[in-house]
Amino acid sequence: MFIPLGDDNRGRKRVPLINYALIALNSYMWYLQLSQGESFTASYAAIPLELVQGIDVTTTQHIRVDGERFPIPQAPGPHPLWLTIFTAMFMHGSWMHLIGNMLYLAIFGDQVEDRLGHIRYLLFYLFAGVVATLTQVYADPTSIVPTVGASGAIAGVLGAYLILHPHNQVRVICFSNIIALPAAIVLGMWIVIQFLGQASAQAGLGGIAYLAHIGGFVVGFATGLLLRVTRPSRRA
């Protein structure tokens, strides 16, 4: 697994204002999660059962994993409940979850925004996040486990970057060395890991929403292909 540190931004022409705003909003939501407590996260996370059945689960539920019973805190959500599809994509489960997502967004989002433009990039990001969440909901519509994270939307960014800038050099940590690799290798390995992770999840292992990552990535990949066909050359 490569840990990205940065990419070649010499071709970028726009200041990535939307990308900066998305990083700031994700960070602010994490601050709210820490300061408001567990009930805030439970209220604004996306819960498949709530979205499919249109009911607001407000009391603690329990699930069984490997024979053990675990509590899943719940709290009253916003009205209408579908707003959690959007709020959840700006929330995270841990410091590492937040830092990892924001690292990928900071490195790869600016050049996708540069290609799409500010408003189209924002709409694209939100659409990828919505599709990612709905993919996870479709896969497990009766789940009461909260889904949070920008990973699905960021996966869309990665999919678009892979198509638009496959040869761009990305600096990564590989074991104890820092090396430069083409984006096609770095992001190609990333999506392979998501498919492998989903295979493990189907075997009953892990708690990561890999299907959401795959759904978001497909949106970005398709968007990148569409841009390659309709706008093959960069703007001046």
Image (cartoon, rainbow, N blue to C red):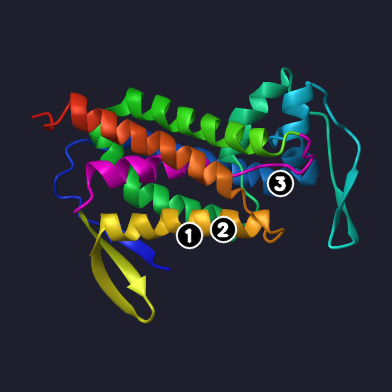
Q: Which residue lies furthest to the bottom in this view?
A: 176
Residue at 39% x, 67% y is 2
Q: Magenta stretch: give its range.
A: 142-167
Q: Residue at x 70, y 37 (%)?
A: 45
For label 3, the SS is helix
- Location of mark 1 (residue): 193
Q: Does the magenta stretch include residue 150?
A: yes
Q: Name the residue under label 2.
A: 197
Q: What residue is pinned by disc 3?
A: 35
Give the quarter of the image for residue 154.
Answer: top left
Q: Which mark is residue 31?
A: none
Relative to 85, does residue 69 appear above or below in the rendering?
below
Q: Quadrant of the C terminus?
A: top left
For mark 1, give the secondary structure.
helix
Q: What percent of the width, then of the height, locates residue 183?
A: 27, 55
- Which amino acid, by three-letter code, is at mark 1? Ile
Tell me residue 149's x, y (percent). Answer: 58, 44
Q: Are marks 2 and 1 in contact (CB under 8 Å)?
A: yes
